[in-house]
Structure formats: structure tokens, C-alpha cells
Image: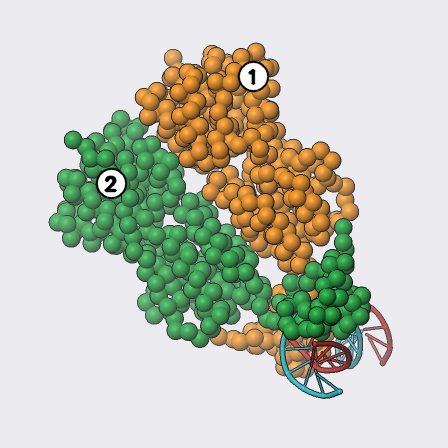
Chain colours: A orange, B green, C red, D cyan
Amino acid sequence: MTKKSTLVLVAERAGVSIASVSRVLNGLPASDGVTERVREAASALGYVPSATARSLKVGKTMQIALAVADVGNPVYVAMMHEVSRVVTEAGYRLVLSSTGSDPSDQIDFLAGLNRGFADGLIMSPLRVTDELVAALQETRVPVVIIGSLPAGVEFDNVRADSAKGIGLAVKHLVKAGRERIAFINGPVDTVPGAARLAGYVRAMTKYGMPLVADMQAAASDFTYRAGLNAARELFSQSTPDAVVCANDLLAVAAMKELSTRGIRVPEQVAVIGMDDTDIAELANPSITGVDLGSVKRARAAAKLLIRRLETPDAPVEQVVIKPSLTVRESTPGAPNPTP
Amino acid sequence: MTKKSTLVLVAERAGVSIASVSRVLNGLPASDGVTERVREAASALGYVPSATARSLKVGKTMQIALAVADVGNPVYVAMMHEVSRVVTEAGYRLVLSSTGSDPSDQIDFLAGLNRGFADGLIMSPLRVTDELVAALQETRVPVVIIGSLPAGVEFDNVRADSAKGIGLAVKHLVKAGRERIAFINGPVDTVPGAARLAGYVRAMTKYGMPLVADMQAAASDFTYRAGLNAARELFSQSTPDAVVCANDLLAVAAMKELSTRGIRVPEQVAVIGMDDTDIAELANPSITGVDLGSVKRARAAAKLLIRRLETPDAPVEQVVIKPSLTVRESTPGAPNPTP
DNA sequence: CTGTTAGCGCATTCAA
DNA sequence: TTGAATGCGCTAACAG
């Protein structure tokens, strides 16, 4: 019900200057008497300081922007959640931009950012175009990038080690005696798509596995629907005994297609997903997955940004998060030993 | 690269007053000459207006806050996404608060809101306590609530018709000849939990189905894990031939438990979920679900808020979104007729 | 059509 | 310790 109320009003009621009110409310030294009366006046008037006025004066909005490529992918939701947590704890608000993967939207957003509605930005771009890099460099506030960047582009940055992650997956499969390990990727022209393909190639080579085209498919998107098509293509052209998927959504799609074809998981084909989001556990059978450290990445990114806001000219930092494998039902050799 | 730049700088370079600069940049009438030179100066200086300064002056932040109860539940993600879309399109930014279901967090958030960092709020509370209602009423900005409210509390409000939704589910099951229709609910002390229980009771009564305690279970949370426990409890105490779940997550859990027990879906037990999120389609078998119109609700809420921001004293509006049923594999009588 | 001026609400310097 | 005064960057009267 209390309408609005300003410093002046409070000052009048307390019979002091607005400066004193400001001091008391910000915990700066003031005599007990003044403190007392200001407090009284403030609460009597239901005074609440104006965030905008303070921002204008102090030059900080206490807001952090987060731009994610693809809401709809649980991994981004998880990251968003973690960023939200860290940022809130540090006293910042989270401004969310779900610009799709459309680069022009992202660039619009960056332009808006320059109006200074946020003190910093965390971004996880799916595709990194030259325009995006340029816009990023024009940005007036600190930026932390989640994901790999083209060589030479320097930002605070945190990324996953996809190569090692896929290595974990392939190793697990090889140990289980699988010999025809296929790969369902997302679009290769995306940052994660490229990284995961490279990782697959490296891992297969490392473990002496044949690298054949028939055993690879790339979905047009990191989505379930696209995954279904890719899986259909893959399984109609080859007969793997294991398939590594670049994504949990793709893994679920692969399992669906296998089920449609009456192929049993993991007996006939083992399935491994990546990101290890909630749905890996929800799936039936639950999916063995490589955790690329999405939550840790999000946390690290948020911390990095906050640190930079506090220490603007600290050296640029690059963090790499280590992957780990969680074995579940979609793969043989589950925790509970099989006879 | 371009540092910062203010109206004054632009005015100086263009040789005009700051007022003229402001006019030109806001599209107000100005002579061609002035317009020209201001434009030139502005772009030469890389001028970008300050969002905060503008906010302070105009009294609008162009930000809308969204407070959701439970990120982690895909239905809220979907709603968030839609709100984001509508709000962005209208020129607003989205400030996200993932205050858990903890009411005190929500109240803190509301207190912060009063500092005026956003022009309005959309909130979908899981539990509505008296304190929350009180805080909501103290709020200085327009609020739109998604979900039911206690009688007498008046806000712009959009909600689902859960009762009718569950009616759809039960009807579908009855038509398919199922006779022992169980119900797995979430916590009854939540807004949706209460509504859905009431809906189940009403629907069962309406279709002349017996209403027995053995056939009902309430998960301690609207999550997969809690759902597993509830399902375990339910299936160990009774043998339904169909189960309606208050949530897609609970439905997935139910299917998992059924699968563990070697019970086939939908032949032996049919499963219906609610919310009809992505995972209903991802599940295997895919889940027949009642779409409670989450996306429509989100859209309506966003539109409602924006309308109120434009027309502060329009009458309070209450929108009810109609549910619909999508038949999938977890239920007999799928689109492709079975012999 | 254009310039001058006055705040928006607050934090902060500078005197007292 | 406290008060008066200044200005953050911008828009909107109000004059001219």
C-alpha cells in the first residue's frame, strides 16, 4: 500500500539532511540519535531505496546478463540455474536472454548490453561467427564465454574437455568389449559439434578402433527430433554395437530408434550420452553419460565474471573443466556386477 | 573499443544542445541539418544511451521479473521460455528469479522488487502462504499470478482448469475400458497438488469410478525421485490398470517402476501424465498427456502484465486456459487404430 | 525548430 | 559527526 518515498521525505521526517539518511542507510558512521530517528522515519514511511537512482550514481546495476543458445536443451537449463544461484548469492540479479542460436539476435542483445543495463555478461554461443566475435569485442562490459573460442580471441573463458570426455566413453566401451563404436553428433558447424567430432576421432584412433563413415551421423540440431533422423540414418546404414551421442537428447533419440527396431540396450547396442543431464537418469534404461561438467562450468563462469567485476584488470583467465563418466544401465558393466 | 560517451559529448561535437541530440535520437521532430550532424556525431563517438539514466528519468526500467518455483521442472522452463519471448518482443528484458519453493526467498525477492528494478512481476507460486499474499499485496509494481489464488485475493491471474484436464484423462481411460484408475499426485499442500487432487476426485465420481485410498499416492515433491517412491508405494499396495500422474516427471517415474516390475505399458497399465512437456514425447513409450496449457498460460500472463503496464487501471482480469489431451503410446487407443 | 533549465533519487565531496 | 551542494545521464517543459 505504501506508495513511494524518497530520501528527502525520510530526511524531513527525521529532521536531518538527506546525506545523513544516506549514511545511516548505508551503514556509514552516524551518531546514535540520528541513526535512531532515521531508522524510525524510514520504516514509518516504508522507505525503499531506488535501484535505478543508485545505479546511475554508482555506475553499477548489480545485474548480470546470461545469454544461452538453446533453452530447451536441459544442459543449458542446468547451467542457467547454477549461474542464477552464484550470481544471486553475490548480490546480483540475473537478466536472461534466450536469444536462439540466431546470431543476429545475439548481436542485438550485445548492442543492448552496451546501454549498460548489466555489469557483465556470460555467454555460451553455439556458433561463433566473425560478427559475433566483433560484437563481443565491442562490448563495454566484461564478458565471460562458456565454450571454446577461435584462436587469438581472448576472453575470460571456461570450457569442457570434450576430447577427454569422449575418450572416457570410448574407453569404457572398449573395455566392455565393444568393437563397432558409432557416433551421433550434432551439427558440425557448432562449437560443441566440432569439438565432439574431434574428440571422437582422437579417441577412436587412440584405442585402435576403425574410423568409418558409415558409423557416423550428424543430426541437424542438438534436439530429440533431429536425433531421431540421425539415428534412423545411422542404424539403416550400419550395425554398431555401441553408439556415443554428442548429447543426452540425441542419446534418448537413439534409444528410441533402437527400441523401434527391436534392438536391445545395452545387450545388443550400448548407448552413451553426453552432458549427463537429468534426462540421462530419467530415461529407461537410464543412460550412461559423460558429464562434461556443465554445472561446474556455469559456476566457474559466474565466479570468473564476479571476480572480474571486482578486479577489472586481473589477467584473462581460462578454465578447463574435467569430464567424468557415470555408468548407468544403457551400457554393460554397470556398478552392480553382472555374472 | 569505444569507451563511453554522453549526450553532452555528442552535443558538443555536433554543435547543438543536448536537447536536440535527445530529440533526434528519439525520433522527435528536428531539422534535417541538425538531424544529420547529430547522427554523424553520435556514430563517430560510438554513442550509446544509458539505460539507467533513462530509467531514472522516465520511471520505467523496461524490465519484467519472472519468479518461478521450480526450475528443474520442464514445465516451468517452457513457461519461462514463452514469457521471455513475449516480453522481449514488447521491448522488455527478463529478470529471472529462481527462488526455490522457499517462501522466504520469494519474499526477499519481492522486497527487492520494491526497489524498482523491474516494472512488473510474473509469479507462479507453488505454495501460497499468508505471508506471501501479504508481501504480494505490498508490492509496488503490477503483479500477474500464474495459478490459483485464495478466494478474495485479487490479482491479474491466469490459471489452468486442472479439474477438466483430469476429466479428460479419466474419460479417455474409461472409454478404453480401464476400471481401476489410480492417481499419483504431488504434495497436496501445493497449489497444483490441491487442484489436481480435487480434479481427480471429481472426475472419478463423475464417471462412476470407485474412489479408494489404495489407489492414490502423493509424492513428496513434483520430481522424478519422489515419483519413484510414490509409484513404488502405489503398486505395492494395489493393482490398477491405469494411472493418472499429476506431472510428466511423476509419469516417467511411474513408467520406470512399472518397467522394473515387468508390467507392460499400456497393455497392463496405462499411464497418463500432465503438463505435456517435451519429456512426454521423449519417453519410451511416449506418454499420453493432458496439456494444461502451460505455454498459453505463460503467454497470457506476459500479455496481461504488459497490458497493465500500459493501462494501469484496467479492471483486474482472470484468464482460464482450457486443457487438451494428446494421445500417445502409453495409453491404448492411439491415433493409429488398433485392431 | 531549438536552446535553457529543471529535476528523476541517490552517493559523495567539501566545509563546517 | 553532519549539512549543503554537486552531478550521474537523460527527458520534458518551457521559452525563444
Say how many tags the image has.
2
Q: Distance between the residues labelled 2 and 1?
A: 45 Å
Q: Report helix, strand or loop for mark 1.
A: helix
Q: Please, is residue B136 above or below residue A334 in the view? A: below
**Looking at the picture, do discs 2 and 1 lie on one chain?**
no
Q: Position of residue A23 (x, y in %)?
A: 71, 69
How crowded is the residue under tag 1: few (<14 C-alpha within 10 Å), some, or many (20+)?
some
- Whether residue A288 sits left or right of residue B178 in the image: it is right
Q: Please, is residue B21 above or below residue A218 in the view? A: below
Q: Where is residue B296 in the image (x, y as percent from the top left)?
A: 38, 55
Q: Residue at point 59% right, 29% down? A: A194
Q: Residue at point 43% right, 22% down? A: A234
- The three-letter amino acid code for the residue at tag 2 is Val
Which chain is disc 2 placed on? B
The label shown at residue A204 is: 1
Observer-nearest of B226 and A253: A253
Callout in the foreground (2, 1): 1
Q: Where is residue A30 in the image (x, y as percent from the top left)?
A: 73, 71
